[in-house]
């Protein structure tokens, strides 16, 4: 019995450790984004992670599927709070309820994931297209305080 318990413990990770590592790796605090993107941990769970899942957008359907698969940590590109502060009712209520009842933590990374130089969406697209010397630039939008991610490539070198 203690052997099984030891094996189970070895497969469990700390939510705090995962979030700390991911925040640092993606530079969550350094990369500007839309005000309501709320990058990083959006919902915490009991603190343990044995299985994680990923999706582009969080939704009732995604959370239902995550619950069925016993996911402890759901990592998404677009989190729950894009509309800003809002009443907790309808879809948002169902989504929060699913997360709380099934002990699912939610982590969101928008522009920090888009512009990451190694695993970012832009870096992956550049790699698929065979672009070798792509450079990234994140700049403030002229119209508001949000951020716009851009990928610049010197086409003369390809």
Image (cartoon, rainbow, N blue to C red):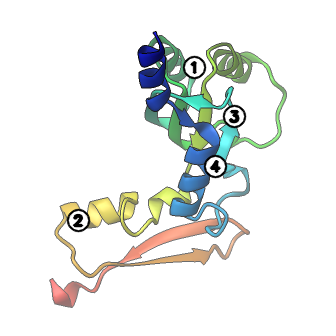
Q: Which residue corresponds to mark 2?
A: 127
Q: Which residue is mark 1?
A: 60
Above or below for 54 versus 132: above
Q: Earlier in the sequence, mark 2 or mark 1?
A: 1
Give the x, y percent position of residue 70: 48, 16
- Element on which disc 4 rests: strand
Find residue 130 and name its label. none
Q: What residue is shown at x 68% (from left), y 26% (from top)? A: 46
Q: Residue 11 location, x and y as percent?
A: 44, 29
**Residue occupying image coordinates x 64% and y 21%:** 99
As drawn, is 58 to the left or to the right of 34? left
Extreme residue in the front direction? 2
Mark in front: 4 vs 1: 4
Q: Position of residue 135 (x, y in %)?
A: 37, 80
User: In terms of sequence position, does the residue under pointer 2 or pointer 4 come before the other?
Assistant: 4
Q: Nearer the viewer, mark 2 or mark 3?
A: 3
Q: Quadrant of the N terminus?
A: top left
Q: Nearer the viewer, mark 2 or mark 4?
A: 4
Looking at the image, tell me whether mark 4 or mark 1 is earlier in sequence order. 4
The alpha-carbon separation of the residues under discs 1 and 3 comes to 15 Å
Query: What residue is pinned by disc 4?
Result: 40
Query: Which residue is drawn at the image coordinates 40% and 73% (left, top)?
Result: 151
Q: Categorize mark 4 by other alpha carbons within 10 Å: few (<14), some (14-19), many (20+).
A: many
Q: Is residue 14 above or below residue 109?
A: above
Assign a secondary structure to mark 3. Answer: strand
């Amino acid at each position: 019995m203690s052997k099984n318990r030891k094996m189970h413990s070895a497969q469990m990770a700390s939510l705090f450790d995962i979030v700390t590592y991911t925040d640092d790796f993606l530079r969550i605090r350094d990369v500007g984004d839309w005000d309501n993107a709320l990058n990083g941990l959006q919902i915490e769970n009991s603190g343990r992670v044995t299985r994680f899942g990923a999706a582009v957008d969080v939704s009732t359907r995604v959370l239902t599927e995550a619950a069925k698969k016993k996911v402890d940590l759901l990592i998404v590109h677009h989190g729950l709070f894009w509309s800003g502060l809002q009443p907790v009712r309808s879809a948002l209520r169902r989504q929060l309820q699913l997360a709380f009842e099934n002990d699912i933590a939610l982590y969101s990374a928008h522009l920090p994931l888009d512009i990451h130089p190694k695993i970012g969406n832009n870096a992956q697209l550049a790699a698929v297209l065979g672009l070798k010397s792509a450079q990234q630039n994140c700049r403030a939008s002229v119209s508001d305080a949000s951020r716009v991610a851009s990928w610049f490539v010197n086409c003369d070198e390809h």
